[in-house]
């Protein structure tokens, strides 16, 4: 019974994911999900009280996939100098949210509109931890020491334009210039404090 229950749950979530990816949020109804999953509408409600609950489950899966992508990118070469390590993190985020992943963007668009508390913050905190590690990675890594507050600000500064581009469905998110500007923003923020002093300043 537990295996059957798990299989039914997985079928419902997968059906919702396929509908969202192929047809968009407007096609995502409990009746459509039930039909695609091959279960009754009652079975859908047995596991999820409403469509928003299904979307939250999809969001959790995407959040994990994005965080794991960033972790994998950093683990691929742990001795990169900090500029390249930061670029790798930014690129992984852009690949996760970009137009080549339109289905994933539809999931994120739906959840961003839900303004689900906590979920986005948890993703940003996980990504932020990797950005901070990337800043000090490798033999060339020199960066200012980040506090929890400055780390919070930096991560939101990076994720803000990405979130805005996803919500507006802007193609710029896939452009090299978009990546370059985010990397530039991050590296300027991470510049060591002594490098910020003006000539003649003590």
Image: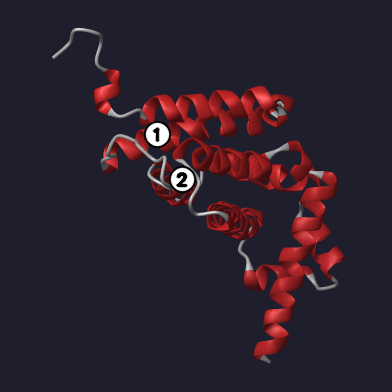
The reply, left or right, for residue 172 in relation to residue 115 is: right
Using the numbered discs, state the Cα–Cα distance from disc 2 to disc 1 in whole angstroms.
10 Å
Q: Residue shown at 74%/68% (left/top)? A: 12
| Neighbourhood count class around disc 1 (C-alpha, 10 Å): few under 14, some 14–19, many 20 upward | many
Residue 169 appears at what percent x and percent y? Answer: 71, 30
Residue 145 visible in image: yes
Q: Is residue 44 left or right of residue 178?
A: right
Residue 78's x, y, as percent?
Answer: 50, 54
Indicate which disc, 2 or 1, sits on the residue closer to the N terminus: 2
Q: How many marks?
A: 2
| x 38%, y 27%: residue | 189
Give above or below for 178 relative to 153. above
Position of the N terminus by quadrant: bottom right
Compared with 175, 78 (above or below) is below
Q: Which residue is mark 2?
A: 124
**Disc marking residue 154:** 1
Q: Is residue 110 visible?
A: no
In terms of secondary structure, where does tag 1 sit? helix
Q: Is residue 190 above or below residue 19?
A: above
Can you say whether 169 is above or below 14 in the image? above
Q: Which colouring convention does the figure follow?
A: secondary structure
Classify the position of the C terminus by image quarter: top left
């Amino acid at each position: 019974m537990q295996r059957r229950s798990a299989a039914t749950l997985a079928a419902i979530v997968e059906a919702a994911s396929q509908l969202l990816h192929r047809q968009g949020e407007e096609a995502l109804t409990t009746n459509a999900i039930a039909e695609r999953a091959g279960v009754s509408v009652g079975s859908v409600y047995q596991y999820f009280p409403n469509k928003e609950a299904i979307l939250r489950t999809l969001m959790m899966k995407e959040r994990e996939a994005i965080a794991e992508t960033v972790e994998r990118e950093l683990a691929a070469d742990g001795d990169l100098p900090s500029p390249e390590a930061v670029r790798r993190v930014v690129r992984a985020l852009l690949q996760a949210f970009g137009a080549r992943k339109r289905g994933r963007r539809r999931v994120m668009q739906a959840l961003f509109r839900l303004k689900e508390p906590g979920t986005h913050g948890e993703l940003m905190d996980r990504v932020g931890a990797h950005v901070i590690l990337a800043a000090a990675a490798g033999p060339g890594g020199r960066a200012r020491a980040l506090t929890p507050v400055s780390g919070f600000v930096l991560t939101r500064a990076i994720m803000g334009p990405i979130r805005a581009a996803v919500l507006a469905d802007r193609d710029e998110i896939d452009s090299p210039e978009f990546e370059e500007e985010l990397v530039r923003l991050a590296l300027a923020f991470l510049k060591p404090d002594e490098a910020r002093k003006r000539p003649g300043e003590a």
